[in-house]
Amino acid sequence: MKRKSLKHILRVVGGVCTLALSACNQKQQAAAPVPASPPEVSVITVAPQPIPYVRDLPGRVAPVRVAEVRSRVSGLIVRQLFEQGSQVKEGDILYKIDPAPYEVELASAEAALAKAEAALTLAAQQAERLETLLTKQTASQAQYDAAVAARKQAEAEVAGAKATRDRAKLNLGWTDVRAPISGRIGRALLTEGNLVQSGGGQVFAVIQQLDPIYVDITQSVGELNKLRRDLASGELSRLENDAANVHLIMDDGALYPLAGRLLFSDVTADPSTGQVTLRVQFPNPHDELFPGMYVRARIKQGIDSDAIAVPQQAIQRTNDGKAEVWVVKADDKVMLQPVEVGPVVGQSWLIRDGLKPGERVVTAGFQKISAGMQVRTVPWFGELLQGGEPSNAEGMEPQGNWSATVPTD
């Protein structure tokens, strides 16, 4: 019995030890490190694309034509025939000046002309009679010469009387003060009852042609010269001459719906500012642009045919402010690469130097990586460059849509 009890105790103790060893093995297996998978990052593959060179420049709206309505004759204004602020056409009667004095002048001039013509008829008949008598030797040469001179004098008096009559007709016609150009007329500066003097400088109203309309923008001589050098070297391509290459940003930030066309740049720089004036012509069918308005003009001055850009969040900054990006190499390991950035392009930075076409740039997942770490890449589908209308970013503007083709593991 004692031997059986001892065997039973040994068996129980052995079982307990076996259970303890098994638990220890399980703890050791649980504590063993499991190999970690590479972190996942979003990337784009950079590729060259044509991007217009765009500048935001200040400008002022100016009318295409401006005319001050003035009177050519003196007199009393008896009627105003236009609605202030309305559209008028060239030749429309705007004011009427009292025509009565000029009607009298015209009647007097016509009477003087009739008298001169009668005198001419008499002088001509007298010269013809004396010419006949001279051939018959019944009149002297002196008498005939005097008759010819009298006829020529009568002809001159008729010509003078006709000129006086024509001038009187002009003065009578000028009592109708007409619009010199087509456009929008402003407020009436003179009204009925005002007495005007010819040559007195009195302005009745001002007419401005507003469709199309000009916007005069300014650019520094240095920027303009650099642009010309880039165009000459081929770094930038020229736009087509008839391209509508200018957009306006209104004072509330809204984009004017119609594009404008650059006409010319001034040949003289302002000595006080060192800037030249560029004139742009815009359609203005609804009179949304008024002379004197301040606007910002977004002007395309060339195309960078092989530009490279990356999303703004891809750019990292060193302690001294230099730009760099995380680049995924061919072995899927990441490294920091210095780059030189240009202006902002929509939601992206233009890269001037440091990246080559085909390189993969990390756009998301920076907190998971460090230099030399192997990563797993996935495509980034965020917003890059937007085509169509220009964005509100200053400097450059995209042309067309960006699509990133990103290889994945």
Image (cartoon, rainbow, N blue to C red):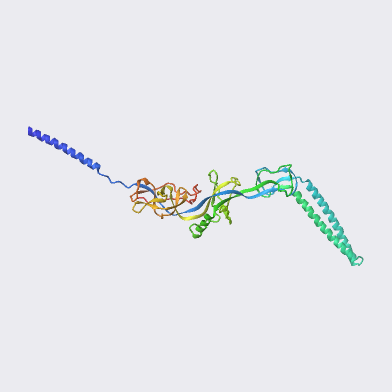
The N terminus, quarter of image: top left
Residue 275 in picture, x, y percent from top left: 56, 53
Task: Describe residue 128's horizontal placement relative to residue 51 as left or right.
Answer: right
Task: Describe residue 215's horizontal placement relative to residue 170 as left or right.
Answer: left
Task: Describe residue 232's horizontal placement relative to residue 361 as left or right.
Answer: right
Give the residue displayed 45% in from the left and 50% down from the top. Answer: 349
Kindly indicate the quadrant of the structure image that contains residue 95.
top right
Query: Number of callouts in the render?
Result: 0
Toward the right, the furthest residue is 138
Image height of 128 relative to 338, above or below:
below
Residue 389 in picture, x, y percent from top left: 51, 48
Toward the top, the furthest residue is 1
Front-most of residues 312 and 87: 312
Residue 306 in picture, x, y percent from top left: 45, 56
Residue 134 in picture, x, y percent from top left: 89, 66
Give the residue displayed 9% in from the left and 34% down from the top. Answer: 6
Front-most of residues 74 and 286: 74
Image height of 16 relative to 246, above or below:
above
Give the residue displayed 85% in from the left and 54% down from the top. Answer: 115
Give the residue displayed 36% in from the left and 45% down from the top. Answer: 367
